[in-house]
Amino acid sequence: MTKTKDNKPNDDVIMVTDEAGMQLYLSEKAANRLSWILTGICVVLSLPVIILAFMCI
């Protein structure tokens, strides 16, 4: 992390690229939030499967 003039630490930037050359720049905080959001979406989408599995017992 680097410090600015105000002594506030800057978050490191995470860069993601694909084969087509599209680039996405995220701060560490934004990448962490995005990972939690995507995890939540996966849990919500898989919840019906888990509920059905317990209903069949």
Image: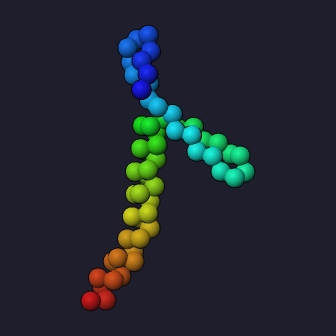
Q: Residue furthest bottom?
A: 57
Residue under the image location 39 percent in, 64 percent down = 43
**Quarter of the figure that contains the C terminus:** bottom left
* Residue that protrudes farthest toward the top in the picture: 5
Q: Measured from the top left, where is residue 38 in percent x and y? A: 46, 55
For image coordinates 38% across by 18% down, the residue present is 8
Query: Residue 45 lies in what quarter of the image?
Result: bottom left
Q: Indicate how the structure is coloured in the image.
A: rainbow
Q: For the image shown, how many numbered marks are present on the structure?
A: 0
Q: Is residue 21 left or right of residue 54?
A: right
Q: Is residue 54 above or below residue 9?
A: below
Q: Image quadrant for the N terminus? A: top left
Q: Residue furthest right?
A: 20
Q: Nearer the viewer, residue 11 or 45?
A: 11
Q: For the point 58% across and 45% down, which residue is it?
A: 16
- When the figure is inspected, residue 39 is found, relative to residue 2, above or below; the finding is below
Q: Looking at the picture, does residue 40 appear above or below residue 29?
A: below
- Residue at image coords 41%, 70%: 46
Q: Nearer the viewer, residue 48 or 39?
A: 39
Expressed as whole percent of the image width and height from the top left, the position of residue 17 reads 63, 46
In the depicted structure, whether residue 15 falls above or below residue 37: above
Residues 36 and 23: in front is: 23
- Residue lying furthest left in this view? 57
